Structure formats: C-alpha cells, structure tokens
Image (cartoon, rainbow, N blue to C red):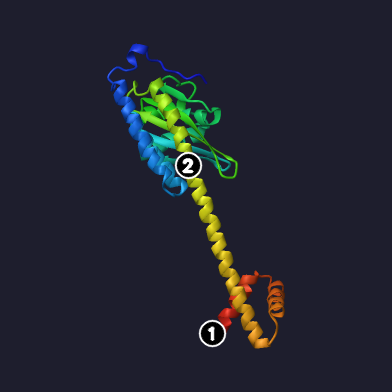
Amino acid sequence: MDRVDPRRPDELGDGRPDLLERIDEAAVALEALRGVFALAEPLGEVLKRVADSAVLAIADADGVTITVVTDDGVHTAAATEEQLVELDEVQYDVGHGPCLEAATARQAVRAVVGQHRKLWPEFEAAAHRLGVCAYLSVPMLVTATDGEKLVGSLNVYGSTASAFDPFDESVMRLFTTAASAAITNAQLWRDTRSRVTQLEAAVYSRAEIDQAKGMLMAVHGCSADEAFLMLVQRSQTQNVKLREVARDILASVRKG
C-alpha cells in the first residue's frame, strides 16, 4: 500500500516545533535507546524500553506500541499506553490494519484517521473512539540468534491530525534500526542465560550420580563401573532418568 499523507506541504510544520528542536528530540531519544545496549535484560523488558524511548523521538507522539508476529500469532509486546493495546488488538482480530501492514509488507504506513475507512473500517472506528487522529507504523525486522527473523512493527499514535510527517517517518526508520541492535543483545542474553542454567543442571546431576555411585561402591564393595551399571539397570527397569535414580538412592541413605 502506498503511504498516504493527505496534508499539503505548507501544513506539515504548522503548529509543530521547528526542525532543529525536532532533531534535538530525536537525538535525546536515540541517546536513551543507547542505554538499552549495555543492559542484559529479557526481551520483553527491552521492547518496553524501546517503546518508552521511541515516544520521546516525536513531539506529537502520544503513545507507542510494538507489534510482534510469531508462528503462534500476533501480539503487542510493549506499549507506553495501555489503551493503545486495544487498538492493536482490533487489528489482530480482523487480520488487517496499519501495524500488520507495516510488519508483513515491510514498509512504513503513515496516515490520518479517516483516510482508510473502507480499507480498515474496524481500526478506523476504534481509533476514532480512542481519540487517535494520526498513526505511523514502521517495520521492525531483527535477525534472531538462531537465524530466524523477528518480524514486527513499531507503531506511533497521535491525537492530532498533523502529528506525523516524512521527517518523523525517517526518524522512526533510524530508530528501529538502532533498536534492532538492542533486541539482538537481549536475545543473546536470554540464550546465554538458558545455556548456563542447563549447564548448571547438568553439573548438579553429574555430582548426584557420582555420589550415588560412591554409596553403591561402599555398600556392595564394587568398582565404579559396576556401581554405574547398577544405576543404569535400575533406571531402565523403573523407566526413570538416571539422575532421578541417583536422587532416590541419596534420599534413602539420608533417611536411614
């Protein structure tokens, strides 16, 4: 869908801060986003910080949401204003709207509420009810640590019809590029934490198995290999994991 901006060029800056002030606001927002890079946070918290920073980048932005498309469906992963989640969910329910258009077509969508009543009637009605007059959705594409793509959009909503113009669209494109780095960092942190947890569990299980072997060697006067074979045979007979057999043996010794 072609991007639509129904305003005349001489109306775009009407009543808005001058260009230098808007550039300063965008710089402040990007500086705030840079702080996300140094933090090891879960993905959900990073997306919330990205949304909070994005709303600072545009003077007339009243709220920001982040849409994420997964194999399990579509959801709003972060929002600066809770009522805007309702506006996103209207689009998810009917399967169309600017945030989905930006995420799936991978192009920015910028328009004034009222322009697309025939194309997105449910979204337009909900936006009008919630007092949203303009919107800007920009695609957000991130390559995950497993090579898969995190597909979504960053959605900016405003309560004035003159809220967004091509400069704002350019700022948000730059912003989503920078945000992608923060999101990738979050994924790396999450994956690393998961691996460490798995490694800790494996080490702990190995320690329990070694202790159980020692118990069996002391009781039966057998070798380490023979004790391990006893554990394996019991595991197969009871159809439980080896570490569970080891824990049962250790628990029975402690009780005794």
Residue 206 falls left or right of residue 187: right
Query: Pointer 1: what residue?
Result: 255
SS for callout 1:
helix
Q: Residue at x 52, y 48 (%)?
A: 188
* Place of residue 132 in the rendered image (x, y in percent of width and height, measured from the top left): 36, 28
Residue 104 visible in the picture: yes
What number is the disc on residue 204?
none
Q: Is residue 183 above or below residue 6?
A: below
Crowdedness near tag 1: few (<14), some (14–19) or many (≥20) residues, C-alpha within 10 Å: few
220 w.r.t. 146: above or below: below
> How many numbered circles does the render carry?
2
Q: Dot 2: what SS?
A: helix
Left or right for 149, reference 132 = right
Q: Which residue is mark 2?
A: 183
144, 223: nearer the viewer:
223
Question: Going 56% across and 44% down the picture, which residue do you hit?
Answer: 145
Q: In the picture, which quadrant includes the C terminus?
A: bottom right
Residue at the spot 56% in from the left edge and 69% down from the top edge: 204
Residue 150 in the image: x percent, y percent?
A: 54, 39
On screen, residue 12 above or below 22: above
Residue type at mark 1?
Lys
Indicate left or right for 9 with 96 as reference: left
Percent coordinates x, y for residue 95 in the rendering = 53, 32
| Label 1–label 2 contact, CB within 8 A | no
User: Which amino acid, mark 2?
Assistant: Ile
Tell me the mark number nearer the camera, choosing from 1 and 2. Answer: 2
Evaluate whether residue 60 shows in this view.
no
Gap between marks 1 and 2 measured at Cα: 49 Å
Could you tell which of marks 1 and 2 lies nearer the N-terminus? Answer: 2
Q: Local crowd at mark 2 within 10 Å, few (<14), some, or many (≥20)?
A: many
